[in-house]
Structures are given as structure tokens and as C-alpha cells.
Image: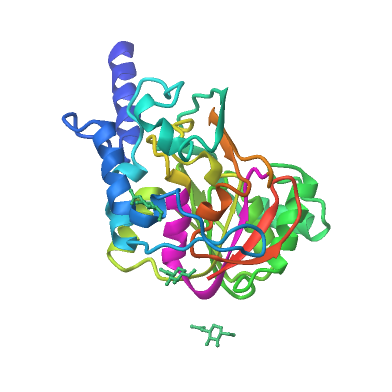
Amino acid sequence: MLIILLFLLTLNIKIAHNEEPTLPEHVTYIDEIKHVRKICGELCNTSRTGIPGKFFNKINATVNCKALFENEYIDSTHGFPLAPRNIPEVFLQEFTMGGKIEVNNAYFNQPYLGNNARTPIWTKSLITEYLSQAKLGKLFGTYGISETNALRDGLRNAPGVKNGRILVIGSEKPWVEACLLEAGAKNIVTLEYGKIKSEHEQITTMVPSEYRRHFLDNTLGLFDAAVSFSSIEHSGLGRYGDALNPWGDLIVVARVWCVTRKNGSLVLGVMYDINHDFLAFNAHRCYGRKRYPYLSTNWNQYYLGKGIQRVHVFTK
Ligand SMILES: *[C@@H]1O[C@H](CO)[C@@H](O)[C@H](O)[C@H]1NC(C)=O
Ligand SMILES: *[C@@H]1O[C@H](CO)[C@@H](O)[C@H](O)[C@H]1NC(C)=O
Ligand SMILES: *[C@@H]1O[C@H](CO)[C@@H](O)[C@H](O)[C@H]1NC(C)=O
């Protein structure tokens, strides 16, 4: 009896985990990545130069928004028993921008895509508590008080945040959302790998499959601004169970471009060192003058903020 129950439980968990699209068996991830490269077009060509900008070179590209949202591989799981430990040889050039980005090792296997996020229920009282700490400049958030305050400073300088409808990418705890409420945001939509239930009336949540679907059936609508702090630098590295994708980070930001209104803004905090871009595989990327121009393709460079994961504000 117990054994049957355990079996059923396992089955249940498996079903829950398989909600995100997985690859059909006859298609290899190599074919899938080559296909992504094709639909991504100019955006994924990292041998272009751009023109001098306020912070670093500015690069633009024609982006096929529909194709980027239609592609299922981008939002799928990597499908390996463990996250790959090394960059597949065939894609080394793509991951390193033709050898321009230094690679070192830092390995994690933290499958997350398809699971529940670490704080699956965001209660109203939790968010109210975070909000009052933010107002006092004392919200610890996920990365400490000074990083939280750097984000608050960025939000105050970001067009569209006040009274706006805001997209948040990747926030396990509602600290970014609390800072947004403080800055006067009206509605917040949080996109996370894991399902989160928000009990706050101004905050709703989405998983990647819902984000795709709503974009494709024209029910997503446009956002006045978007915010991401310490999330995008992981995209496409497999660490969190996501499919390998040399341009995973560029595509996340380009999709945000697609769903932000003209004159809206993007507030971005990622690992940053203007003089030293690197890829610690599979932990994260660090952005400097080599890759940041591609990460911020098409965005105008607007306000340079503070923090270790230095907050940058861009406008559309
Ligand atoms: C990428 O851009 C460079 C510079 O514009 C160009 O020479 C090259 O052909 C492009 N590569 C591809 C695969 O489109
Ligand atoms: C990109 O910028 C160049 C000049 O820097 C301009 O000629 C071109 O039209 C721009 N392309 C897009 C898609 O905005
Ligand atoms: C964007 O801002 C510019 C400059 O303030 C303004 O002229 C333009 O009408 C705005 N466009 C939209 C679509 O809001």
C-alpha cells in the first residue's frame, strides 16, 4: 500500500515537473540551438561593433519578436540527468563570442524550471513588511541592503515606473516588487521559472509558458517598464535546469524589448565589470564592454546607477 502511494506520489511530481515543454527525442539540442541562431538573426550575431554610447557601445538589431516567443526550445529544460559541466565543444565559439570572453569553471546543478519557487506564496503581510523596510532604506532583499538601495535609486530614475504596469523577471522573494510599490508602480507582473502565488492585489505572477502564450495570443499587453536584478546572467547556462543557449541572456532582454512600450524603460542589475567580461560556466556571466552592448541591444543608455551588480537604466 505504502509502495503504491509512493509510486503515485513520484508520478505526480513527475507530471508537475513536465509542464514546461521538453524536446522530442529525435531532435537534438544541437539542432535546436542552430535553429535558435537562425530565428534570432542579427541579435545573436556578436561580431558586430555598434557605435559609441553613454556607457559602452550601442548595438541595434532587427528582432523577430513573434519567432522568439514561438520557439519552444528557449523555454524548455535541458533534458540531461545533470546540468552539463562543460560548454559543448560545438558551441564554444558562440558562448565565448568567438573567443573574446574568458571562461572559467564554477559548477552548479540546481534544477528549478518547472518547480515551485522558493517562496511559493507571497502573502500581503510579507509584502507590506518588505515595503515598510524599503521605505526606511533597510530592506535586505536577496543581496543585502546596499544592493536593494541601488535598485531603489535606479527605479526612481526609470521612466514609466511611477503609475506604471511593470514586468519583473526572476525574483524569488518579492523584494524587487516591494521596491516597485514604493516607487509608485500601479501593477506588477512577475515572471519566474517556478510557480508563485501572490496574495497582493497589485502583483500577479507568470511562468515562462504563460508569458509565451499570452504574447502569442495578444493578451499580454505592453509594459511601461521592466526590471531584472541578478537573473539574466544565468539564462541559457543550464544551472537552473534551463536549456543550453549561448544567447539565452540576449534573448530574454530582447523579448522584454518586444513587450515594453515606446519611451518605457528597463532597469537591469547583473554581474558587472566594465573592464572584465567573463563566463563562469555554468554559474553566471559577468558583463563589461564586450557583452553588455549585445545584452542591451536596441535600448538607449539612460542612467548609470550604483551597486556591485551595477544598476543600469535603459529606455526604449
Ligand atoms: C555577423 O555580422 C558581421 C558584421 O556585420 C558579418 O560580417 C557577418 O557576416 C555576420 N554573421 C552572420 C552569421 O550573419
Ligand atoms: C541601427 O543603427 C544604424 C546606425 O547606427 C542605423 O543605420 C540602422 O537603421 C539601425 N537599425 C535599426 C534596426 O534600428
Ligand atoms: C516619447 O517621448 C517623446 C519625447 O518626450 C515624445 O515626443 C513622443 O511622443 C513619445 N512617444 C510615445 C509613443 O509616447
Residue 27 locus on image (x, y percent): 19, 33
Tell me if residue 282 can be seen. Answer: no
Vertical placement of residue 128 versus 237, above or below: below
Q: Residue visible at 45% across and 36% down? A: 95
Q: Residue visible at 43% across and 66% down? A: 259
Vertical placement of residue 144 versus 299, above or below: above
21 in the magenta segment: no
**Nearest the eye: 95 or 22:** 95
**Nearest the eye: 261 or 28:** 28
Tell me if residue 23 can be seen. Answer: yes
Magenta stretch bounds: 250-272
Q: Residue visible at 43% across and 24% down? A: 83
Residue 163 locus on image (x, y percent): 61, 75
Q: Residue visible at 67% across and 71% down? A: 184
Q: Which quadrant, please, contains the N terminus?
A: top left
258 in the magenta segment: yes
Left/right of residue 127 with respect to residue 25 in the rendered view: right
Left/right of residue 10 with respect to residue 305 in the rendered view: left
Which of the 4 image quadrants contains residue 57? Answer: bottom right
Left/right of residue 150 with respect to residue 87 in the rendered view: right
Residue 283 locus on image (x, y percent): 55, 30
